Image: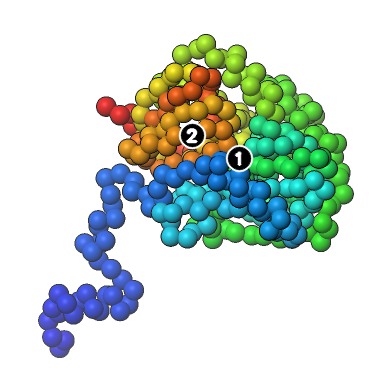
């Protein structure tokens, strides 16, 4: 007959066999999220120097000239927040970044320069400052710059989420630049008309079939609503939507743009889910978990899940922020919640 188990011998037994008692790990069931990611800011004064030096230090070949923004709280993980990665990508006149595809979905927000393109599944999408361009999951895409400008954009991908699900797939195309099979900006001519969509198209993909959301249309929408009360937490905040369903542009990434009027100070709130914002225009201050970040054009800021966040416009003109978030995932799984500061 076995000797009676002592507490130490019992724990040794289960640990040696890859088991732990709930009483040992119950502290991980926290009253609220405690993300490892920290609020962080990448100032354009630094990014601009990195962009300039990358033009001579890093050639474009099979891989892109894309500087990934790693969150200091995540110990070297390929992540800007727990679920999202942002990067700054640079393309010089005449360069082509080879076609590839991957299971992580991606967006491009154009920060500087005009006239480069992203080709998505045979459609050349011409990019201008402030435009949002989609690269949905597993779609062939390449980049090229046929303009005279150095073009810089912010990439946003769901890499950390896809990696956590063990769903990373990647494939390089045999061709550097596959043949165009659709009209230039073809999806915009089909689907870029607000609530009007062609009746003869049968595809209803989970991602928006509109690949280009132009800055001109975005500004028109913002200014049409500028005199409304808006959200006390976000100002005049608009979501980029699926051209057919009205849902998020991608199943795993939401995209928003918000206008904060000169002198406006918004209220503080927490939301379940993380975000990354890029300053398109103006100056302001964001307080994230008690830490103040002063921002201006092209600065990029990471906001962890459940971080108390408030924005204020400290400049003399309207401030405009573009952001990506993981809210579509939280809402699809029934995990989204928010809490205003009492």
Residue that badge 1 annotates: 250
State the residue at coordinates (39%, 30%): 310
- Toward the top, the furthest residue is 227
Left or right, residue 342 beside residue 324: left
Residue visible at 46% across and 24% down in the picture: 313
Q: Does residue 254 appear anywhere in the picture?
A: no
Q: Position of residue 96 (x, y in %)?
A: 79, 51
The local crowd at label 2, few if under 14, some if 14 to 19, many if 20 or more residues have their Cα within 10 Å, is many
- Of tags 1 and 2, the one toward the viewer is 2
Circle 2 is placed at which residue position? 295
Task: Reply above or below: 329 against 239.
Answer: below
Q: Which mark is residue 287?
A: none
Tag 1 secondary structure: loop
Nearer-the-camera pick, 204 or 96: 96
136 sits left or right of 83 in the view = right
Distance (Cα) linking label 1 and label 2: 28 Å
From where the camera sits, is residue 272 visible?
yes
Q: Residue at x 40, y 23 (%)?
A: 266
Tell me the quadrant of the picture where the C terminus can be found.
top left
Quadrant hosting residue 109? top right
Q: Which quarter of the rendering shows the N terminus? A: bottom left
Location of residue 211 by image quarter? top right
Which of these two is toward me, 172 or 150?
150
The percent position of residue 56, horizontal first and vertical second, equals: 71, 56
Residue at disc 2, secondary structure: strand
């Amino acid at each position: 007959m076995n000797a009676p188990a002592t507490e130490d011998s019992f724990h040794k037994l289960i640990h040696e066999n890859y088991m732990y008692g709930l009483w040992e790990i119950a502290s991980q069931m926290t009253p609220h999220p405690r993300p490892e990611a920290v609020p962080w800011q990448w100032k354009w004064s630094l990014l601009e120097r990195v962009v300039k030096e990358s033009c001579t230090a890093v050639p474009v070949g099979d891989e892109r000239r894309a500087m990934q923004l790693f969150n200091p709280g995540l110990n070297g993980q390929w992540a800007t927040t727990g679920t999202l990665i942002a990067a700054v990508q640079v393309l010089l006149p005449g360069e082509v970044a080879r076609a590839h595809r991957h299971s992580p979905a991606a967006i491009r927000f154009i920060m500087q320069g005009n006239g480069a393109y992203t080709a998505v599944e045979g459609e050349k999408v011409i990019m201008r400052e402030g435009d949002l361009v989609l690269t949905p999951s597993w779609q062939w895409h390449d980049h090229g710059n046929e303009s005279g400008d150095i073009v810089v954009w912010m990439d946003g991908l769901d890499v950390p989420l896809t990696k956590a699900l063990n769903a990373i797939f990647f494939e390089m195309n045999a061709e550097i630049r596959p043949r165009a099979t659709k009209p230039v900006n073809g999806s915009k001519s089909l689907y870029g008309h607000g609530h009007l969509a062609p009746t003869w198209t049968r595809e209803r993909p989970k991602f928006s079939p509109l690949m280009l959301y132009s800055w001109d249309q975005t500004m028109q929408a913002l200014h049409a609503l500028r005199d409304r009360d808006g959200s006390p937490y976000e100002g005049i905040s608009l979501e980029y939507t699926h051209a057919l369903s009205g849902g998020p542009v991608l199943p795993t990434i939401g995209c928003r743009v918000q206008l904060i009027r000169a002198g406006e100070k918004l209220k503080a709130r927490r939301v379940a889910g993380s975000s990354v914002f890029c300053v398109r225009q103006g100056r302001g201050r964001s307080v994230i978990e008690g830490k103040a970040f002063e921002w201006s054009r092209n600065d990029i800021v990471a906001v962890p899940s459940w971080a108390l966040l408030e924005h204020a416009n400290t400049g003399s003109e309207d401030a405009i922020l573009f952001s990506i978030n993981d809210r579509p995932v939280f809402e699809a799984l029934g995990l989204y919640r928010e809490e205003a500061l009492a």
